[in-house]
Image: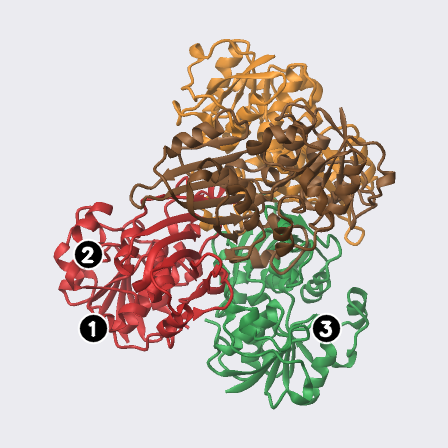
Chain colours: A brown, B green, C red, D orange
């Protein structure tokens, strides 16, 4: 059993990570911390997760011996904590954006001045379907954003051939986080669909880094709690065997499903699966790709556990099926 | 045309009142005010209402000449403003709880020290189906709470005979107001049902005042935006012609509908109607009554306009059909 | 007062058309018919519409004298009825697809053998923002589909310059009609987003006819009842003053709103408005356009009334504000 | 490993039972059958369950050797199949109502003529919190209805003292089953709350049988997919230590949680838990009890697995945590 701490367990993704670790057959959840809710029981805050631990304030010296940590802090706040844990030899999966972008100026253009730029080189981008071997040997993994997870899985098999990429995304409200705002108010989100971050969403540079092509990316808020769909419209540079590329790329992948009909986000709710439908459109010559994930699971917390499984030499699917 | 101001037009009920006045054939919306959003356009805050006015800070001396006002302030904050308007001879419909309870100690037990207790005697409880004549002559009307509106309309015909009253209510999230909180967060309310205020909801004394009997009242939050149902389970002191009492009580009422099957809250969405189904249960001897309203309309803003119509000598249904 | 019949008033759009005519200040609803529900009261089927008429079986000879009719039959079934009414000099707005496509082979490729091809030449495409003058003089108007209404209003100002057009649409479940199916089951649609008709939706040729350019169009079902958004991603042939074109095209339009921020479908719920946000994206050179309508209102029934107003020489906005 | 068949696996509860058995560490899902969908893959019908089996037509002789079966047929259709399986020595959990009521005339009053009345004596009512020992030795278990499960768990500790019982229930739409109907249409259920079966719901006699008291029971449909709440208002015959009775009754119960605040149905979504809040109301002398379950899980399929665990001598919680 490996001992694991979840740092920042009072937000949606941290709390879910705590639950997944707590129920994991080969991991032991030894500590959960929170900046805002220290002293409260996690199962009081999230009855549905049934994690009977008290949230502590984070103090590196009071953490006790742990083998690994999942950090679920906001960008900017995460990097210093990650650095501290990393220095002590604790394997870290970071749910924030702090170590996802390899280029510091790009990070600083979209986020804040980077608190720990020298650590970026040590970080592996935590998409197992793309970097499985690197993750196995990594001590620091930057867990992808939810939209990038879906978008990259949707288009990765076509990456070398992509020419013009439109990604229209739809996400449930949990993606906006636990903070109550006008946007997350039930009466604002219910019976509504709204685009946001038009032309300037922070997940765009992350998608572009991995796909190696400029993308137009627009997320929309839809009235559901968990789940995310990306609808991709792409033009290819060359005439390739589109379906063959997907079958080859995802043969043997435990968490990617190719579907011969359009998926719904319900198909993957509360799972680590990504389900993909590819439609080469003869009429227009474009390729349409639809991918669904649960934004809190494969888009965050269960993917973090998948990464942890790899980093700790466990079965990649342990605790996730 | 009567000139009307809406004081506190940035909350859900104030904004809707502004829209109803703005579109009313015989009322002129001359001013909208807000404590939190002064300077913003109301149609920027609520595009769906399409009221092209700028919200002002409230200043009695800058209000200009108005015939009537709808005040949509929280309890405690409302009474002083109502008093000020009343003093200048402006007819007022108050959406707050400040003038609903005739007994000051009861008010102060459930709310706050009453800022204007001497004004209570001047106020008429604004349920037209019960106090139509008094409202016609009133200069100050205390608009009922949403649950009391539904509950009193549901049980008023049986009032003299009521013995044991259980009211199980279900309300959409707009009833909790515009403030973003953990409760109103989409992810908290969606796919959920939760009782609240168990044994201690402030609308209980208001219902009891009007029905003249002790009630057990429990509201539940349900995942919809607008709409409210009360399910009433009552035992009667005497054997009466239940259905006859309802038909008699509501004959000719423009906004009360008796239905021979259970109603849904959708039946009255965005209307001033209350729809009622009465089921005398032979098996148990109880009477079951189900009533639905739109909590923002008949439960607040459109009922305020109905009251205003009566106070100003207009057709009671003007602007409401 | 003009006498109007609604043929096929038991479906969602027919029933709403009946309500709008019934409350219209210058129209008189004289008959409602239904193939499936003849004999039932319309306000029993749709309490929320409060139309106190009994549905008749449709019989041209028993219809009585009417000035105009709105026909809400499915495609294929509509054309013969439209022809019959037209022959008797009754002005008709047809909600079906039967007279929208000017090219018979195109219609027959996407629908069925056309029952009344010779009547197509008499029909005007009922988008007032584009064909107002023609509609004024028309005796037969083909009311646009919901997606075409939103998509054409979104892109019409750019039509001559469009080069590559992607339209990603999201629609509430009422768009799928009143028939209970696996797709419209609450448990299928709730907490879900699903693309459908990928690469082969019947509204595509209608959009292409009006915009004069090939489009990639994908609708998605989202968990709400009424409302529709189109998110358009286009590349232009030339460098034009995009915002200027929109302002020019829609100056004075009573039902089109240009917004400087992304709209939500709630903004237009239960209205005849279309709200549009245009975002020229400097980074990619594309133009992004987002438009929202209520699929049952501007996407069907209220647009039918807008057309009827024009055909009958009434104020275009009568009964719609 | 015990070999288990699920008979009738194409409905919501049968399909979920199949998933729970398929993932169970000590059960082997060897067959799934369907009357309506034989020949289809279960993971095609329900992608989210990921059960890679083909649905067969049910034929007792082609079933192969199985140790136990879960039958998920409608009432009336279930009993003959249950009898056949029982005769061959296969342990059966029956999800239908056929063996829940011990009194044949009562069954026949509320349902249909009973096809296998002599088998009723062999059946144990499958609420482990009440009949654990009997279930351990049973060969036929009648799985409780969803409302009875919640209602009996809510009130069982008070059963000897109950005098006047009102149960107001709220259920998600999955409780109405997979058949698409006007009631289950998204547009009917969304933004709606509707009581149904007023005064005559079939779960009433089942609740009365177990509580031994007459109850007034009214279910309401609320707009969510899974989840159920019962709000109980009871008067007691005697002055008892209410909270003490609950603590005593449920000490050590693995799936019943007593909560000191009102629960929400989300708290138990996709779990076998029942969460209960008890509020003795000093003001009125009544006791209010709120209980939540997932209607498809503890209200049906996971409770069936809990029963199977007991019948097969396994850990009661196996496959359920």
Mark drawn on residue C137: 1
Q: Name the residue tied to disc 2.
A: C81
Q: Residues within 10 Å of mark 1 (few under 14, many from 20)?
A: some
Q: Position of residue D276 (x, y in %)?
A: 72, 39
Q: Of callouts 1 and 2, which one flags the residue occurring earlier in the amino acid sequence? A: 2
| Callout 2 touching callout 3 (CB < 8 Å) | no
Question: Mark 2 or 3, which is nearer the eye?
Answer: 2
Q: Residues within 10 Å of mark 3 (few under 14, many from 20)?
A: many
Q: Chain of mark 2?
A: C
Left or right of C51: which side holds A54? right
Give the Cα distance between marks 1 and 2.
21 Å
Question: Mark 3 or 1, which is nearer the eye?
Answer: 1
| Secondary structure under the numbered disc 1 in the rendered image | loop
Placement of D62 over or under A99, stated as above or below: above
Residue A66 seen: yes
| Residue at image coords 42%, 19% | D56
Q: Name the residue tied to disc 3.
A: B98
Question: Is residue C1 or residue D50 the one in the foreground?
Answer: D50
Q: Chain of mark 1?
A: C
Q: Position of residue C87 (x, y in %)?
A: 13, 63
| Secondary structure under the numbered disc 2 in the rendered image | helix
Q: Residues within 10 Å of mark 2 (few under 14, many from 20)?
A: many
Question: Mark 1 or 2, which is nearer the eye?
Answer: 1
Give the Cα distance between marks 3 and 1.
58 Å
| Residue at image coords 66%, 44% | A99
Same chain for mark 1 and mark 2? The answer is yes
């Amino acid at each position: 059993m490996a001992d694991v701490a979840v740092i920042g367990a009072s937000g949606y993704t941290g709390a879910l990570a705590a639950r997944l670790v707590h129920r994991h057959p080969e991991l032991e959840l030894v500590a959960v911390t929170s900046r805002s809710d220290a002293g409260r029981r996690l199962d009081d805050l999230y009855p549905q997760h049934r994690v009977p631990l008290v949230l502590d304030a984070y103090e590196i010296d009071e953490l006790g011996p742990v083998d690994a940590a999942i950090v679920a802090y906001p960008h900017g706040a995460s990097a210093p904590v990650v650095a501290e844990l990393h220095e002590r030899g604790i394997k870290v999966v970071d749910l924030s954006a702090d170590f996802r972008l390899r280029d510091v100026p790009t990070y600083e253009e979209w986020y804040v001045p980077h608190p720990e730029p020298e650590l970026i080189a040590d970080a592996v981008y935590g998409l197992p379907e793309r970097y499985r071997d690197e993750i196995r040997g990594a001590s620091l993994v930057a867990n992808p954003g939810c939209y990038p997870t879906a978008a990259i899985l949707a288009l990765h098999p076509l990456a070398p051939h992509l020419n013009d990429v439109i990604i229209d995304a739809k996400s449930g409200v949990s993606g906006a986080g636990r903070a109550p705002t006008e946007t997350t108010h039930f009466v604002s989100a219910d019976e509504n669909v709204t685009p946001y971050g038009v032309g300037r969403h922070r997940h765009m540079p992350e998608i572009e880094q991995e796909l190696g092509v400029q993308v137009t990316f627009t997320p929309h808020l839809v009235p559901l709690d968990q789940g995310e769909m990306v609808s991709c419209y792409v033009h290819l540079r060359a005439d390739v065997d589109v379906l063959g590329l997907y079958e080859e790329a995802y043969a043997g992948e435990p968490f990617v499903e190719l579907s011969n009909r359009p998926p719904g986000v319900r198909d993957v709710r509360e799972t680590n699966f990504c389900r993909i439908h590819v439609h080469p459109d003869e009429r227009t010559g474009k390729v349409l790709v639809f991918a669904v994930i649960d934004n809190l699971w494969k888009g965050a917390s269960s993917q973090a556990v998948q990464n942890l499984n790899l980093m700790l030499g466990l079965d990649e699917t342990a605790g996730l099926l």
